[in-house]
Amino acid sequence: MASHIYYIFPKLFFSRHPSQFFVNTPFVVTKFYQHILALVFAIDEINENPKILPNVTLGFHIYDSYSDSRMTYRATLDLLFKSHQFVPNYKCGIHENVIGVIGGMSSDTSSHIADILGLYKIPQISYGSFEPAVNDQSKFLSFYRMVPNEALQYEGIVQLLLHFRWKWVGHIVVDDEGGQRFLQTMEPMLLQNGICSAFIEKVIKSLQLSLKIPDLINEIKKIWPNFLRSKAKAVIIYGESSTIIWLGSVIRMIQVIFPHYKEMLSTAKVWITTAQIDFTLYTLQKFVDIDMQMFHGAISFAVQSKELEGFQEFLHTANPSWADGDGFINFFWEQAFSCSVSKSTVLTFIGITCTGEEMLENLPSPYFEMSMTGHSYSIYNAVYALAHALHTMYSASANHRRMEAKGRLSPLNVDPWQLHSFLQRMSFNNSAGDEITLNEQGELAAGFDITNLVTFPNQSYMRVKVGRLDPQAPLEKVFTINEDSIKWNKDLTQNNSDISLHSTFDSRGRQEEKATFDEFLFEASMAEDFGQKFSKSYLETCVSCPEDHYSNKAKDQCIPKIPNFLAFGDTLGIISNFSALLLCLITVLVLGIFINHRDTPIVKANNRSLTYILLTSLLFCFLCSLLFIGMPNKETCLFRQTAFGIIFSVALSSILAKTISVVLAFMATKPGSRMRKWVGKRLAYSIVISCSSVQVGICSLWLSTSPPFPDLDMYVMTEEIVLSCNEGSILMFCCVLGYMGILAIVSFNVAFLSRKLPDSFNESRFITFSMLVFCSVWLSFVPTYLSTSGKYMVAVEIFSILASSAGLLGCIFSPKCYIIVLRPELNNREQLIRRKHINNR
């Protein structure tokens, strides 16, 4: 029985041709052919191993995505449903037993494949570093990755930049969903570590493989400032291998047009590439003469790999004679060796016939590598993962099947969805001795190698392992790098940090000094666009100040913002404290005078019970102002406005009760008046309690629905953080103030109407004036409060509380205290009767 693995190969062939001169020529990235050979090598090993899948032949089919999303969808549908004709969602005459799909290498290819395979729960194993989008998790339930989590790679990039003190970096990313996600993840991480983005260059995918001169010229115009004027020492490249092809083409064109900038472009940058990228060229680029030495010293993150026993010998057997079983070998061989295979029309115009004796090891590394690459290693492990899952499922079903005479397992029809339970947390040792384990997220539980690219004049290169990123190592060894093993470009050997980057230009003479000044002006204009703060030393570093810091005048340092609140030790705080305590002392003194002279006519005449309530409430009004001083906390914010509102309402209710009592007392003195039954303490207490209860209800509703809470504002003031109490509901705060205003206005109107009543101790005129002062203070409070901020806003409210309370205390009680203390002869019954007779006349 044959079980089949389907392999969707991204970008062995491309649907967009690199030149108009080769319109009918299939365009091959020869280096990726090793991926196919790794797949074939793994399947041959499994079929020859009697310990894995006995009596089962593992086969494979290969589909190419042609670097096109529509072709990816079509290829995926083809492998599921195509027989003699394409009928979606129907299997017509297909006898192969599909057990899984390996692919793709890039995030967009993997995502397009997952769109289809996720519907049918067919296992898909990607061999490229790829992080699914958060909102796409549902379609990746059948998705596995033979690479580590991409987030680990981001952490490694940050650690690498911090190790070499590269604080000023550029970005080259593919303009797709993966590139956007990379920027959204990386930029906050870089800023948190004091690393700034010098530029961001987004590469349109359709232009990555274009060699047309107009396209290259347009790209040169766009990226010229970034590559020439930016002093970013390190440039992070995120994309695919075609991004390197595009970058090499553009830089080479700039070097040809502007030869005096050649070294500035190629040797003054450190290229940092991610695991998706392989340094590759295609054969037709020989005509463009791209120099791989421009990438000398590049640092790359790579999927960990090892050499497999027998793989080198297998590569040596590759030959055009495979053409009957390998539909790719002729295209690969012709473009790798620039010759024409017999009876082929692919490259017959070259005039050189392939002998079949060409050696793969003679090809430069950008066109083909003899050593196992990280992606080929991932494909090899992916094949074994599917094979082990299938074998484990067969073994688990052994008790339900008959055994053959030799004790070998009999074949069993398998639905691919049945493999998921065996693929999850899969663990096995491959032939190289590596433990291959998939974690609960379906990704390889491993790390990344950090490699250094060493190039040679013959366009070849070698990758030297210089470090490692291992999440399973102790914390201090998660990121390790051997700096002495790194081969740098010549301009980088002198100083590989950003600190003295401008010295490279200064040493070249006066003409370059002028260019450096122009660069400074250009970078400064970029700084304004991005809202970042740069240092004055040729922008060697930049710091985007945190929210709780601000930049100094020189824009080269972040200074912590000072907390802004009305503290007890501030001048305003001391004045407010002293004023509140002094007024409290005066209020206590007045209350003591009235209690001590409680039996005198002047105290009795003005309802001494209400007087005591009023003086007590004024005392608490002065004390509640102290709640507004000091650092806001949950308790003070919760009670200071509500306490102030309720206490003031009690005071105003007492004044209203006193005023109404005076009016009713005068009306009750008339013969036959029915008002006598309303005169007394019961009415006064009822007014105080009912009016105060309304305010208590408003405050209770406020606290239960949207209570005040401590808050801080980092933006209203540049150099300070405003610590304040957020009122929670502005509507409820306005209701509290509005209700006090209503009580004050009613009290003023009643007192004003009763100010001329004939009474020796009539205090209505004093209440009228006190209400006038009260209303004036709070009317001026509103615009002043809204026009201030920080501690001055709090000071305005404290002043309004103290001023209005002092106005009530002074206007109502100072005349009485004057008579009681300084003119006691006026405070007697005879004087009261005499003044009544005089008034009656």
Image (spheres, rainbow, N blue to C red):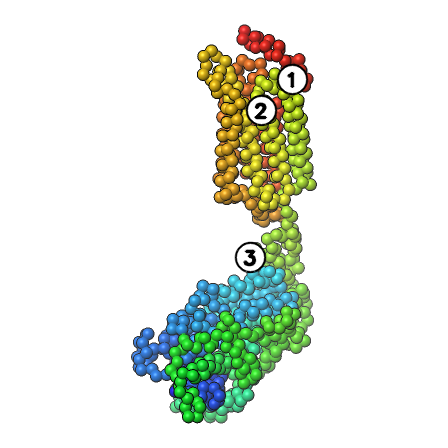
The quadrant where residue 432 appears? bottom right
User: Who's the residue at 58% across and 39% down the image?
Assistant: 640
The quadrant where residue 542 appears? bottom right
In this picture, residue 138 sits left or right of residue 165: left
Q: Which residue is mark 3?
A: 530
Q: Secondary structure at mark 2?
A: helix
Q: Amino acid at mark 2?
A: Ser
Residue 565 seen in the current view: yes
Q: Secondary structure at mark 3?
A: helix
- Of labels 1 and 2, earlier in sequence is 2
User: Who's the residue at 56% across and 70% down the image?
Assistant: 153
Q: Amino acid at mark 1?
A: Ile
User: Residue 250: where, in percent of width, then height?
Assistant: 52, 71
User: Residue 540: where, in percent of width, then height?
Assistant: 64, 62
Quadrant housing the C terminus: top right
Q: Which residue is mark 2?
A: 609
**Closer to us: mark 1 or mark 3?**
1
Quadrant housing the N terminus: bottom left
Q: CA distance from mark 3 to mark 2?
A: 68 Å
Residue 65 seen in the current view: no
Q: Secondary structure at mark 1?
A: helix
Give me the disc on residue 819: 1
- Of labels 3 and 2, earlier in sequence is 3
Q: CA distance from mark 1 to mark 3?
A: 73 Å
**Closer to us: mark 3 or mark 2?**
2
